[in-house]
Amino acid sequence: MNDNRPTARPTERAVLATTATGHAPTVADVLALPVLAAGQPQVVTGVTHLDRPVRWVHITELTDPASFLKGGELVLTTGMPLPDDSAGVRRYVDELADVRAAALVIELVRRYHRPPEVLVRACRARGLPLITLAEDVNFLEVTQVVHSLILGSQAEAMRRTQRIHEAFTALTLRGAGAGEVVRAAAEMSGHTVVLENLMHQALICEPSGSTVEEALTGWEQRSRAIPYDEYDEYDESKTDGSGTTDWLVASVEYKGERWGRLAMLPAPADGPAFGPEHLTVLERTAMALTVARLIHPTPWERTAHRNALRDLAGQRHRSPADARARCTALGLPTEDSRYRAILVGLGTSTMDEGALLEAHLSQELRATGTQALVGELAPGRVGVLLALRPGRPWRPVVQRLSDAARAATPQATVTVGSEVTDLHDSARSFREASRVAEATPPGQPLPPDRSFHELSDIGLRRLLYALREDTRIQDYARRRLGHLVDHDIRHGTDLLTTLRHYLDAAGKKTTAARRGGVSRETVYQRLRTIERLLDCDLESGEQRAELHVALTALDVVRFRAAGGHGT
């Protein structure tokens, strides 16, 4: 039974466009050329191997043509030299398959009018494409046309290689960082490119034609399947001439020692196959990264953590699955874990202080065996995302981390968000930690039992402090207390202090008098004046509560106006 079927026939212009990309024409490309299409080619066997590249065309009437081949040739014959015996035919096919000939094309005009069944069986057994021509074809013209295409593709490949070298030279000269270099590699190659360290943690992933989830799911296991001492160079002989391999990898060095490696992943089914230019891109990427590591002193692991944290806090991932795949590839547990965000505010600090604290906290977490991402989220603010096993108490971990932060930077303020069970929800924990930080004035006393602040610490004063920039809060304080403040300024009185003592004493006039160091009659007189100026009833619990809020708001606004140094 034959696999006879007509070949696809794209126009010659389409074939030329394919070879103009720098790739050698395939068997399918060659069969579609008018010079061969005129012979009415039929694919008898090997239809799934028509994507093999054609390196050369070889016309032969020898019984042992394989001795003159190097692989990748399209073999043209009239069929005259084929042996008469079955063993000879099988040997003829075996020799062509062993040298990896691209395909065997036999003209059914002179000796045969249909291909011998033994030839068909032999080609099918070895996966060698067998194509028959029903009409006479000028083999010399075929070689001229195909060879011109091949030479053109080789010239274009050289031009592409030159452009690759120029692009990476430009990146190196302007001091591009690792992320930009890997991004350029993905764009130039059309393949996903991943930078990993020696621990098989994926630090940078630039997907092309796929998602981060598809690229990084099961990353460590997949990466460890390719030993570091195996350099997976492009080699068509590995892949039956299809031009694809599992991965292309290249080592990345730092100060003469291997630091990690790059991996270029296979493209989706409709994407570009690996070719020699992809290996060039990978090699130049590795060289550019070596230079980038020397120029940019920040360790890439820290940069990877920092970028992952910023994307989690800002919910900038394409999907929750992408977030989980990325963090898993960085070594953070994403299954059966609880997450909690911590922010360390440094106040006024330099970039070096933030980087030093980042490194110090990372070391502290490693010493306790705590899985976490650590990174500077903004100048003067370092973020930590803890990943804790269910049942493990979080307070001792945060307390130790807070103590370490304050020991390294005494002015540091540590705030904590609530626990979340889904990594994607960690943005909520970061928002809560940020709100606690916004509600924590400089110099705010610490709770008696810990050195960090959490949501439960936010009372009225700290809530209003967090809202101090809101003009509605400022306007409320002005409307309720403005006349009283103006009176004190014009007459040199201190009725505002008397009101404070009265409100703090929950309306007890005797306690207010004792606190103010005045008599009860003086307090009575001042309170009546306050009621007249503010048009209020101080015996009303509701109005006392309103005035207490206004007075607290005035305190925090004055705190802001004084630069945070007092009221």
Image (tube, grey):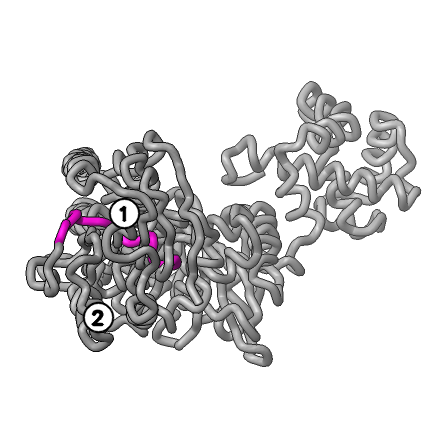
Give the farthest residue toward the left: 68
Q: Quadrant of residue 244?
A: bottom left
Can residue 446 be seen at all in this image of the molecule? no
Residue 239 lies in magenta, yes or no? no
Question: Which residue occupies the foreground of this view, 67 or 163?
Answer: 67
Query: Can you give x and y, in whole percent of width and height, for residue 460 in the image?
Result: 71, 49
Residue at (34%, 40%) from the top-left corner? 37
Is residue 292 left or right of 220 when viewed as pictured?
left
Q: Circle 1 is placed at which residue position?
A: 178
Q: Earlier in the sequence, mark 1 or mark 2?
A: 2
In the image, residue 529 above or below residue 40: above
Is residue 496 left or right of 390 when viewed as pictured?
right
What's drawn in magenta, residue-wise? 47-60
Can residue 91 be seen at all in this image of the molecule? yes
Q: Circle 2 is placed at which residue position?
A: 89
Dot 1: element: helix
Question: Which residue occupies the foreground of this view, 284 or 457?
Answer: 284
Give the farthest residue toward the bottom: 391
Query: Can you give x and y, in whole percent of width and height, for residue 139 in the image?
Result: 19, 42
